[in-house]
Amino acid sequence: MSEPIIDRTQAQSRADRIRVLRDELATLEREGILQLLPEQRRGFDQWAESTLRELNSRFDVDISAGEKQMSWGMKIASTFGGLAFCAAAVLFALRFWGYLTPPAQVAAAAALPLLGLAATEFAARREKTLYFAGLLALASLGAFIANLNILGSVYNMPPSPGAMLPWGLFCLALAYRYGLRPMLVIGLGLVCGWIAAAFRVGTGLHWEEFLEETEVIACSGLILFAISLWVQHRRHTDFPAVYRFLGAWLFFIPVFVLAAAGEPSYLRLDSKTIELIYELGGLAASLALIWLGIRRVWTASVNTGAVAFVAFLFLRLHRWWWDWMPKYLFFASVGVVAIGLVLLFRRIRAGMK
């Protein structure tokens, strides 16, 4: 007995499998490899059509390749539209807020996010694809950002990294309420930014340069990746992949910066030693991610690990050969190494069959 389908991601996955199965069956029949009896063929077609109709009525899934391509376009358009509304809300507040009295400013600042949330809830109840809900959620975020900025200016509060935490929690609440992955990415990014800024303030430095807290950001990335392994997301089954993807890049990018420059770092070592530590650590972590991705069948993790491994390997080859080797010979050598990696990966791939 198959597991019950609880969200649109699972429904879309099953619809894709049914479509592939139907196409493969038609191919086998054309090639004379498999021939079903007429009643068997009718039974299969009826089952496939009824299942797809049920999935489409419950979750509004894409049942053809053309519909899937259109859905990607709609997702991109809704995301850009939401970002545009988000920017419009902030800029509108900055442009016209000075004409309002302080009580009116506070009232309007409190009302705008609530109106955005009400519109998001209304759209989510009306449509199953959540394109308009995602757009309105981003607009609500813009209103909430403007809300805190306005209240801070009304009460003469100095800029603070603390605003990133409520912004991030606001995004996470919307993400888990409606299953919106863009809001999840923004929310996790804001929370990680707040952690880095708070850590910087705790060390007595100015918070606006929080991106220089490379080691703190890398640790935040590891925490996000660990959450994807330890926390169950039974309602939003596509969220762990977001945690893995974002966590991996939040780890590898700061580690690559440290491997390339050796700073800024809290390690009390010379820059060359720091570079070597993070370079070897990045190579080891990328290989571990590739292994884990292959073992768990996480394609995005395998691709992320492969990109990171190539980046760290190129950095190592640059340090070995760039200063003394002719440039044409350096790039030719890198090409030879790349061919060797392709052959190695092909051998590993063949051994997995």
Image: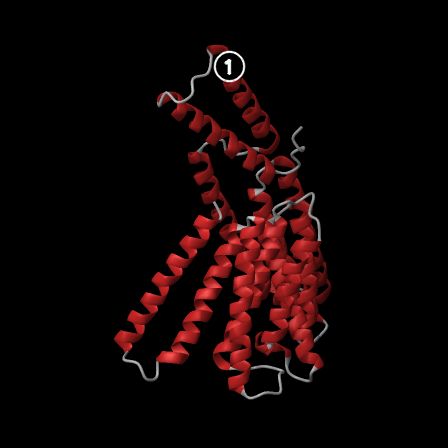
Q: What percent of the width, then of the height, locates residue 241?
A: 59, 51
The residue sitting at the front extreme is: 351
Image quadrant containing the N terminus:
top right
What kind of element bears circle 1? Answer: helix
Q: Find residue 118 and report its horizontal and vertical position in percent.
A: 68, 46
Which residue is more in the foreground, 35 or 125?
Answer: 35
**x and y, in percent, of residue 351 in the image:** 47, 50
* Whether residue 190 is situated above or below residue 43 in the rendered picture: below
Relative to 336, 59 lies left or right: right
Q: Residues within 10 Å of mark 1 (few under 14, many from 20)?
A: few
Can residue 85 be seen here? no
Left or right, 45 with reference to 30:
right
User: Count the marks: how many?
Assistant: 1
For this rendering, which residue is in front, 337 or 305?
337
The quadrant where residue 251 appears: bottom right
Q: Disc 1 marks which residue? A: 40
282 over 307 or under it: above or below:
below
Q: Residue at x 38, y 58 (%)?
A: 342
The amino acid type, in three-letter code, at marker 1 is: Gln
Left or right of 32 in this view: 289: right
Q: Is residue 121 visible?
A: yes
Picture coordinates of residue 292, whole percent (x, y): 57, 56
Which residue is at a point 60% across and 33% down the rendered structure image?
A: 59
> In which quadrant of the rendered view does residue 165 lie?
bottom right
**127 versus 170 height, above or below:** above
Q: Nearer the viewer, residue 144 or 192?
A: 192
